[in-house]
Image (tube, rainbow, N blue to C red):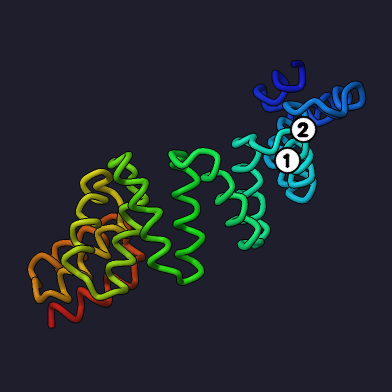
Amino acid sequence: MRAFRLQRRGKLKEAVEEYHRALEKDHNHVEAHYGLGRTLYSLGELSEAIIAFQKALALEPTFIGALFQLSICYYRRCMVKEAIESLEKTLEINPEFLPAHYRLGVAYFHQGKLDEAMRHFRQVVERKGEYTIAHYHMGVIFERKVLFGEAIEEFSQVVAANPNDASGHYHLGHCYANRSMDDLAIGEYMRAIQLDPDDQASLAELKKLQR
């Protein structure tokens, strides 16, 4: 499809016009609705993208790609309830779809539903252990539950996978400090500051430990 080729070449506005032409010829062209939605999303036109994905789903209700992309649009519009519903539907169709588990974890995390969030993050790391960002969120959840030993395990995996993750080093330092492992905490705070000299949180915590 010419619209798809235009989209891949970054000619997004031309691609939108081409998708509209294709849909004028065939209103039931599922891939055209989906492609239009993705292109509109890339242009930041979220309301129109939502309509396009909804039309694709009206024609093919089990279209996982459209459901997932729709959830992303909803989330960016701060329509968290609708985003969660779309993600849940995605997992009803394919329980192994890890991006949906991850995004559900994030959605529940931001709602303060930490146990629900943890359940979905666990689904991700059990199937794909190197999914570092899920380990990070799990670490924060353990930290909030004052389970610092478990949090250390998660943040250790984060910084092992990405040694330049300043936030991971900060949280690791915080956990060590709360277990009275001051030397390790100082090392992590210093690493975080080395990576991000403007990290005020690490600077403040390091100052407390060095008094």
Q: Name the one closer to the observer, 73 or 167.
A: 73
Residue at the spot 30% in from the left edge and 57% down from the top edge = 166
Residue at the spot 27% in from the left edge and 65% down from the top edge = 171
Residue 45 relative to residue 157: left or right: right
Q: Which residue is mark 1?
A: 53
Residue 83: horizontal and vertical position, in percent? 61, 55
Real-space Cα separation, disc 2 to disc 1, in angstroms = 6 Å
Secondary element type, mark 2: helix
Answer with the quarter of the image where residue 59 lies: top right
Q: Tell me: residue 183, above or below residue 132.
A: below
Residue at the spot 87% in from the left edge and 23% down from the top edge = 26
Residue at the spot 71% in from the left edge and 46% down from the top edge = 44
Residue type at numbered disc 2? His
Which residue appears farthest toward the top when viewing the image?
A: 1
Q: Residues within 10 Å of mark 1 (few under 14, many from 20)?
A: many
Asked if disc 2 and disc 1 are in contact, CB closer than 8 Å, the reply is: yes
Q: Residues within 10 Å of mark 2 (few under 14, many from 20)?
A: many
Q: Which residue is mark 2?
A: 33
Q: Name the one closer to the observer, 8 or 109.
A: 109
Which residue appears farthest toward the right when viewing the image?
A: 24
Residue type at numbered disc 1? Phe
